[in-house]
Image (spheres, rainbow, N blue to C red):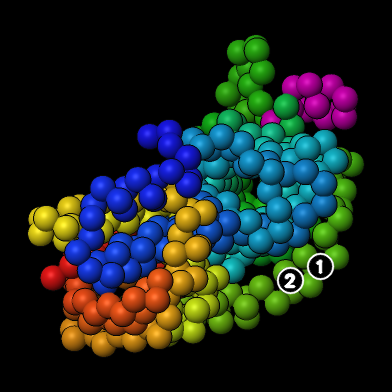
Amino acid sequence: MSHSFAWFPRRLLGSLQFRTPGALCQFTLLLFLGLAACWAGRVEAANAVAGKPAVFAVVFRLDGALTASGPDGNRALRPGDPVAVGERVVASAHGEGVLKTRDGGYIAIRPGAEFVAERFAADGNPSDNSQLNLFKGALRIISGWIGKVNRQGSRVSTSTATIGIRGTDHEPYVLLDDDAQVTQFKPGTYDKVNQGGTTLQAAGQSIDIDPGKVGFARSPGKSRALMTLLFPVLLDKVPAFYVPGKFDAELDELSKNAAANNALELESRRKQVAACVPNEVAKRWVKDLDKHIVAGNAETILAMFAQDVRVKATVRGGNGKMTTLELQRNEFADSIVAAVSSLRDYKHRRITIEGKPADGAASACGQIAVKSIVIEEGRQAGKPYRFESEEKYLLEQVDGVWLAIQAETRQR
């Protein structure tokens, strides 16, 4: 559809010929919920909503330019922005940043670095895992609780090596051929350990790297080198290209307290998971929604809905027949604000609230299907109304917060 904001609501509402002001109000409120997704996009732009990759980190510190690229294109990162699994993060020649991961760890991105989080799960379970792929440049990684609960599942991969993490503060560095010519160092994968320890694997062999040491796995280059030349080795000294970043003083302090902080965050996450009782979650979520609607707290309401929430309304028209509307939020945003502003003396009563794991959900903390019968009344555009409807929501937990990824209402 290509209609203007102003045309769409008037034409659509007029064609439906609602029988009562209540039906019109119900439709208006559902449009408002659709608008919620539009405004909430900034809060959860890349979160784990239906069909979207999960968030693995947020931007904690930034100096210069960092970009993230994925299926939806490229975007410049800003402090507080989420970064999703599968997004390729690139630092400019003078850009640096620090990401805070969902398991309480930190990833410092050095100038010119490029990497992607290929897998990431942080639910406080033994199966939690992290798989980073470093294409070029350097990172400083202070591992989170994943390095404690599942060391085998915490990895950094490059084109020539794999780095296993043992509860660590370390700095993997991929030196490509062009950069190697400038620095006069051999191309390949380097890893410097500041605290803890790593295991560097290449060419079927592995070495352990202790604090203060640097491991190196040579790049095969264009020639057919002997396999033994590709085995990982420990270097005699730290290469000169390892220099502190702009945020390293802060990272040094975070690294000192990493073990204690990881333990606290892991316990907090486990409590969140244990608290996933579907019916209780449903009641709390709906209660919060009602409270914010009564208070007219628009921004808080909007934050309860995911960016691409799907909203559907089934209402009774003037001919008595039920009409189902698939709401297109980008076409009615301007008109909804005016419609909601005319709502007065709003009251509601919940008859029932039910919550249960959604069909196909792996656990209660995956997705929760909510169903509620509600009676609402008030004045819409100066006219009194009263109606009863059935509401359905599909909730998904993102970073410990339940968001609606689907919303549906049907007039009874």
Determine if residue 311 is in view: yes
Determine if residue 151 is in view: no
Give the residue type that dot 2 points to: Leu
Q: Quadrant of the N terminus?
A: top left
Q: Nearer the viewer, residue 154 or 91?
A: 91
Query: Circle 1 sits in a helix, a strand or a loop, which is it?
Result: helix
Vertical position of residue 340 compared to residue 46: above or below:
below
Q: Are marks 2 and 1 in contact (CB under 8 Å)?
A: yes
Q: Which residue is mark 2?
A: 254
Give left or right: position of 193 versus 46.
right
What residue is rendered at 54% in x and 46% in y? 117
Give left or right: position of 53 versus 240.
left
Does residue 185 belong to the magenta stretch? Answer: yes
Query: Circle 2 sits in a helix, a strand or a loop, which is it?
Result: helix
Label 1: few (<14), some (14–19) or many (≥20) C-alpha neighbours in 10 Å = few
What residue is rendered at 71% in x and 53% in y? 78
What residue is rendered at 37% in x and 73% in y? 380
Give the residue type that dot 1 points to: Glu
Give left or right: position of 212 versus 45.
right
Q: Which residue is mark 1?
A: 250
Residue extent of the magenta highlight: 177-191
Q: CA distance from mark 2 to mark 1?
A: 6 Å
Direction front: furthest residue: 382
Direction left: furthest residue: 320
Label 2: few (<14), some (14–19) or many (≥20) C-alpha neighbours in 10 Å = some
Vertical position of residue 48 compared to residue 122: above or below:
above
What residue is rendered at 67% in x and 57% in y? 59
Q: What label sits on residue 219 in the rendered view?
A: none
